[in-house]
Image: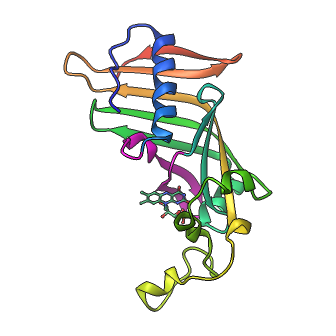
Amino acid sequence: MSTDWQMDALPALAAGIVARLKQACGTIADPWRLPVLATLGPEGPDARVVVLREVLNEGRELLAFSDRRAPKIAQIRQHPRIALVFYDGAGPVQLRVHGQAKVDETPDAERWAWLSDAQRQNYRSLAIPGTPVLNPSEGWATTDRSGLEEFAVIRMTVETMDWLWLARAGHRRAQFSWEAGNWCGRWAVP
Ligand SMILES: Cc1cc2nc3c(=O)[nH]c(=O)nc-3n(C[C@H](O)[C@H](O)[C@H](O)COP(=O)(O)O)c2cc1C
């Protein structure tokens, strides 16, 4: 799960970051599996934890799942610019990612099939996520809906990555942007 970040070549570091993101998708205990997704809401910045579900095209595209009725979905539709923050205390290392998100318009039956029945339960509420309820257990009321109709895939196209490693021997920071099909990097002052 931990990565040796001692890399002196920027292409190797970019490849290491992408490899770690791919690994995080499939590793429950990897802290990079649970990034914070920041969006712009009607009252200003908003942020929440999501599960990183898929890493495509050398890290250029990152996928997360959500209920399409959730406030973050409306926020993304209105303001597609997003940021994701990944943090791992073992390092410690932080990755900040900026890009554009969009929400798939049709329910994705293929990815829905990946989810367990317990995970599908997240999509079966009758009321919109965030609706006030009188009792704490009311928000988790079961219905016999499938949930697929509320299942949304959020596709995030990454434009830039900002990596920061607080190493004892000296902190390091690198910034990457996607140019002509590659991560183009430079070192920066931490
Ligand atoms: C460990 C953890 C994982 C989560 N994963 C997701 C997720 O993959 N998708 C999602 O929509 N919400 C996820 N949530 C819930 C969100 O953080 C958030 O509370 C919820 O989606 C409502 O966000 P919104 O009101 O900004 O739409 C997760 C929360 C936690 C604590």
Q: Give 160 or 49, whichever is nearer the viewer.
A: 49
Q: Is residue 116 visible?
A: yes
Position of residue 128 measured from the top left corner of the image (x, y, whole percent) = 62, 76
At a point 69% along the width and 18% down the height, the residue shown is: 181
Residue 50 is a magenta residue: yes
Q: How is the image coloured?
A: rainbow
Position of residue 60 measured from the top left corner of the image (x, y, whole percent) = 63, 30
Instruction: State whether residue 157 is above or below residue 48.
Output: above
Position of residue 85 measured from the top left corner of the image (x, y, whole percent) = 45, 41
Determine which quarter of the picture holds residue 82.
top right
Position of residue 138 measured from the top left corner of the image (x, y, whole percent) = 49, 87
Q: Is residue 160 left or right of 167 when viewed as pictured?
A: right
At a point 62% along the width and 44% down the height, the residue shown is: 63
Instruction: State whether residue 131 is above or below residue 171.
Output: below
Determine which quarter of the picture holds residue 136.
bottom left
- The residue furthest top is 9
At a point 32% along the width and 20% down the height, the residue shown is: 4
Residue 40 is a magenta residue: yes
Q: Give 51 or 179, whichever is nearer the viewer.
A: 51
Q: Give 98 or 57, whichever is nearer the viewer.
A: 57
Quarter placement of the C terminus: top left
- The residue furthest bottom is 134
Quarter placement of the N terminus: top left
Q: Is residue 42 left or right of 138 when viewed as pictured?
A: right
Which region of the structure is painted magenta?
A: 28-52
Instruction: State whether residue 151 is above or below residue 114.
Output: below
At a point 54% along the width and 63% down the height, the residue shown is: 119
Instruction: State whether residue 89 is above or below residue 126.
Output: above
Q: Is residue 108 visible?
A: no
